[in-house]
């Protein structure tokens, strides 16, 4: 029995719409299943309205990976990275996309659509898709991102050292 293809989620705002459509076609041509979470046109759209549903699905394990696009990539990455287990990385070159996967196990690729062309966008996507997580010392570092007790400890130490408290 043939294994089902991995489903990659994809979403954008208006600035990323055109490149989103091209990357969706690229994903399909590479044999991935794609779930497009919108928008359906280049009409003005707020990035958070599309980043939240994608990040939530990655966070809760409904999907392993997703791709977000907006003008700079910043708004999408800010929104997506608020979710547990989401590691959204902005990549503007294939090398950065590969390192985001290899060293940081990035499970959401964020593209700054106003700053990458179609061919560059495809190359960034392929580098991210094709690069495995290296594990090893990088796994230890990635695990520290999710450590809630570490975050609580840091906030306590900051408030104890803050003379304005």
Image: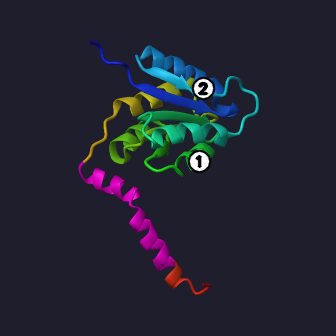
Nearest to the observer: residue 140 or residue 117: 140
Q: Which range is magenta? A: 136-158
Image position, residue 135 (x, y; %): 26, 46
Residue marked by disc 1: 79
Q: Is residue 60 left or right of residue 68?
A: left
Q: Quadrant of residue 95?
A: top left
Binning the other alpha carbons within 10 Å of mark 1 as few (below 14), some (14 to 19) or many (20 upward) gives some
Residue marked by disc 2: 19
Nearest to the observer: residue 49 or residue 71: 49
Residue shown at 62%/85% (left/top)? Answer: 164
Image position, residue 117 (x, y; %): 58, 28
Image position, residue 110 (x, y; %): 53, 39
Looking at the picture, the colour scheme in use is rainbow
Binning the other alpha carbons within 10 Å of mark 2 as few (below 14), some (14 to 19) or many (20 upward) gives many
Q: Is residue 15 left or right of residue 85?
A: right
Nearest to the observer: residue 46 or residue 60: 60
The quadrant the N terminus occupies is top left
Residue 112 visible in the snapshot: no
Residue shown at 45%/70% (left/top)? Answer: 152
Residue 141 drawn in magenta: yes
């Amino acid at each position: 029995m043939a294994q089902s293809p991995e489903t990659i989620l994809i979403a954008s705002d208006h600035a990323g719409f055109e490149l989103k459509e091209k990357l969706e076609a690229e994903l399909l041509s590479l044999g991935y299943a794609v779930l497009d979470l919108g928008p359906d046109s280049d009409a003005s759209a707020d990035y958070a309205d599309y980043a939240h549903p994608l990040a939530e699905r990655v966070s809760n394990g409904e999907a392993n990976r997703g791709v977000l696009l907006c003008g700079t990539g910043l708004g999408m990455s800010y929104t997506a990275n608020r979710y547990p287990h989401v590691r959204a990385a902005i990549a503007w070159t294939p090398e950065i996309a590969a390192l985001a996967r290899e060293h940081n196990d990035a499970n959401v690729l964020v593209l700054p659509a106003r700053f990458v062309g179609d061919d560059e966008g495809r190359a960034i996507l392929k580098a991210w898709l094709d690069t495995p997580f290296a594990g090893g010392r990088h796994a230890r570092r990635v695990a520290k991102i999710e450590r809630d007790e570490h975050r609580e400890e840091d906030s306590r130490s900051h408030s104890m050292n803050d003379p304005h408290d």
